[in-house]
Amino acid sequence: MARIGSSELDVFPLAFGGNVFGWTADEKESFELLDAYTAAGGNFIDTADVYSAWVPGNSGGESEAIIGRWFAARGKSKRDQVVVATKVGSHPDFRGLRAENVRSAVEASLRRLQTDRIDLYYTHRDDPDTPVEEFLGALDQLVKEGKVREIGASNISAERLTEALAASEREGLARYVALQQHYNLVERDEYEGTLAEVVGAHGLSSVPYYALAAGFLTGKYRPGAKVDSARAGSAGKYLDSERGQRVLVALDEVAEAHGAEVATVALAWLAAQPTVVAPIASARTLDQLPALLAMADLTLSADEVAKLTAASA
C-alpha cells in the first residue's frame, strides 16, 4: 500500500478504472471484475459522474450506479475497505465548477454510489471561468460535512494548480492531495516538466489515467493484427509512430526477461516514476485483470527503467 499525498488514504499500487462499467462491461461483468480486483488485495476504485455518458442510451452516472449496487450487494464492510475516487464537473447536468454545481453533483454521486462519503473527489476539468476560491470553498465545505474525505485535481495546468494550492494555503481551505493526468510510456510531454515539478514540490501524488495508452501498451496492437476493442482506433494510432515501435521492442525485451506480460511492464515503468503512486488501468474481462494486478509485484531495475525511458523519448 502507498499513501496519497498528505492524506490518510492508503491505496493499492494499481487503481481500477471504472470507466468500463456500463460501457464495455455490463453489470454482471463489472461485479465480477470488482470482486476479483478486491480479492487480489486491490482497494482503489476510480470513476467519474460522467461515466459513461458517451454511450448511446446512457446519460452519465452509470459507472457510479453499478459501483453503488455492488457496495449494496457486498455490504458495509466491503465499502469500508475500499477507497472510492470520483469526479465533478463533466456530467451533462452538472458542467463546470461553480459552487452550486459542485454541491448538486456531489449529492447525485453519493446517491448513485449508495455511500455517505467520497474518499477522493477530483475536479474533473479546470473551469477557467470559476475562481479557484469558489470551487475550493465548496469542496472545503463538503470535507467539513464529512461527505468528502480528500480532494484532487484532474486536467489542470501547472499555473492553475499552483494558483489553487496557494489559495488553499492562504484561505485555509481544503487542499489538493492528488493529480490525475494523462501519462504513460508513449504520452509523456503533458505531465513531465513543469506540471510534475509542481506536484513534486507540493507533495501531491500522481494517479495517471490512460496508463496503458487505450490498450496499446498491452502489446496486443501489432502490425497486421486486428483487435476487437472499443478503443482500437485510439490505440492503433501509436503503431504508426517511431516512438510506438521503439517502445514495443523495449517492452518485449523487459517482459521476456521477467517472464511478464507487456502490460505489467508498462504499468511498472509508470509506477517507478517520481510522484506516481497508483496508475489507473481498466479491464473489461476477467482474463485481462491478472496482467494488471501483477504490476504490484514487479520491480524494474534502474537499467530497465532507463531502457524504457530512452525508447519512449
Image (cartoon, helix red, strand yellow):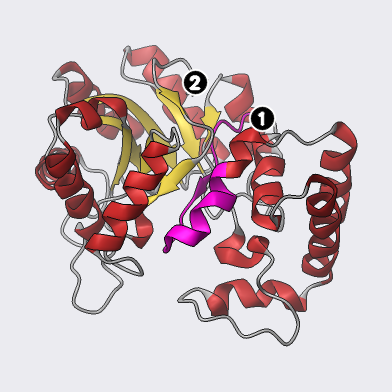
Please name which of the two marks, 2 or 1, marks the residue nearer to the observer: 2
Q: Give the labeled residue for mark 2.
A: 5
x, y percent for residue 61: 20, 57
Mark yes or no: residue 313 visible.
no
Residue 280 counted in the magenta span: yes
Quadrant location of residue 122?
A: top left
Name the foreground residue: 147 vs 217: 217
Residue 243 counted in the magenta span: no
Q: Is 231 left or right of 117, judged from the image as shown?
A: right
Alpha-carbon span between mark 2 and mark 1: 14 Å
Q: Which badge, 2 or 1, is on the more N-terminal residue? A: 2
Range drawn in magenta: 275-293
Residue type of the residue flagged with mark 1: Glu
Quadrant location of residue 115?
A: top left
Which circle marks residue 197 in the picture?
1
Q: Is 21 left or right of 6, judged from the image as shown?
A: left
| Classed neighbour count for the residue bearing mark 1: other residues with Cα under 10 Å, few (<14), some (14–19), many (≥20) | some
| Classed neighbour count for the residue bearing mark 2: other residues with Cα under 10 Å, few (<14), some (14–19), many (≥20) | many
| Secondary structure of the residue carrying numbered label 1 | helix
x, y percent for residue 66: 20, 54
Q: Is 237 left or right of 211, judged from the image as shown?
A: right
Name the foreground residue: 84 vs 164: 84
Name the foreground residue: 305 vs 293: 293
